[in-house]
Image: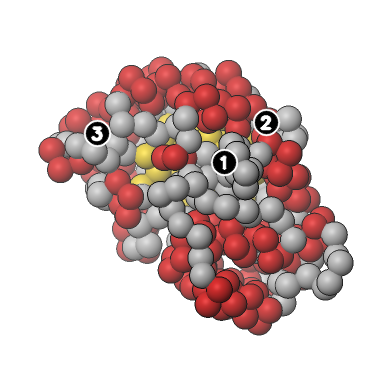
Amino acid sequence: MKRVLKGVLVPITTPFDAESGDVAPVALRQNARALLEAGAAGLVAAGSTGEAALLSEREFEQIVGWMRDVVPDERWLLAGAGRESTRGTIAACRAAAEAGADAVLVRAPSYYAPVLAQNDLVAHFRRIADSSPVPVLLYNIPKYTGITFSESLIAALADHENIVGAKDSSGDLKLFAAYRDAAPAWAWFIGSGSRYYAGLELGAAGGILAVACFATSLAVSIGEAFEAGDKSKAGAAQEVLAPLSREIVDRLGIPGIKAAMDLVGLIGGPVRAPLSELGEKERSRIAELLAAAGLLPAAGMARRGAVSSAGGGR
């Protein structure tokens, strides 16, 4: 590994052109620069928050390459490379590496989830890790895959030298602690913004947090304060972050995240069908939450200033 894998990694959204529906590379790069300037340790391209399931393989490769253009070597660029087949996932890992990704985030297959035994999953992830040109992080996201990793699955993979970490979005802190015990050498990332501080107390290396798409500096400040030993400051910042994560990310999903990005001065823009846009009631509620957290920029503030000042700046 070139550097320590830790901190807040932002699973960046994928902006689409409102007219054509195509991926908008200028907006993508602009958002990426702003998130990095706000203190993100790195970015995750084409993850769940990036509407990965709605992208073509060509778009996936382009997005990783476009982001590599603006992510400096000292920051992390991960790519969501999980696919339904082992073969397809290996191909995505190779494509991500070719486009410039430092590592890949790999979910479990979902379509055949009810008939996949643990041995099948172990073999799947081992073959991927054997073949991937870049390090692999596993991604536990039962909400979308229907599969919750077991502690024994993690233990069975803990010795693979090319599996270096994992993101847990189960929301179960007891399970997260069990995972860490099963693979203590891995870099473990919490996937829930409302549980970020608790995850750090359990030994998380950081968070891959959708809420950081629009509250970057606030999320970063939690980890910085925690690492500095100022748990009171970290806890206070967590109290501000938690309702944003629960009400915008968990309740409203990607449309809510993109609407919040628009409001803080980034480019959220439309979602891709079959996802649907929010109504005015939901958008007004998002504005209220952001105002309460002090994240709404002053009128006319530039995008860079808006995102950098979120949560008090960095």
Q: Nearer the viewer, residue 117 or 309?
A: 309
The CA span between labels 3 and 1 is 35 Å
- Dot 1 amino acid type: Gly
Disc 3 vs disc 1: which is toward the camera? 1
- Dot 2 amino acid type: Trp
Residue at the limit of the structure toward the front, as seen here = 19
Q: Is residue 71 above or below residue 50?
A: above
- Side (left or right) of 62 relative to 185: right
2 and 1 marks in contact (CB < 8 Å): no
The CA span between labels 3 and 2 is 32 Å
Q: Earlier in the sequence, mark 3 or mark 2?
A: 2
3 and 2 marks in contact (CB < 8 Å): no
What is the secondary structure assignment of the residue under circle 2?
helix
Q: Nearer the viewer, residue 158 or 80?
A: 80
Disc 2 vs disc 1: which is toward the camera? 1
Report whether residue 252 is seen: yes
Q: Earlier in the sequence, mark 3 or mark 1?
A: 1
Render colour scheme = secondary structure
**Screen quadrant of the C terminus:** bottom right
What is the secondary structure assignment of the residue under circle 3?
helix
Crowd band around label 2 with a 10 angstrom C-alpha radius: few (<14), some (14–19), many (20+): some
Q: Which residue is mark 1?
A: 21
Q: Which residue is mark 3?
A: 121
- Dot 3 amino acid type: Leu
Q: Residue at x 33, y 19 (%)?
A: 87
- Side (left or right) of 288 relative to 201: right
Residue 66 circle label: 2
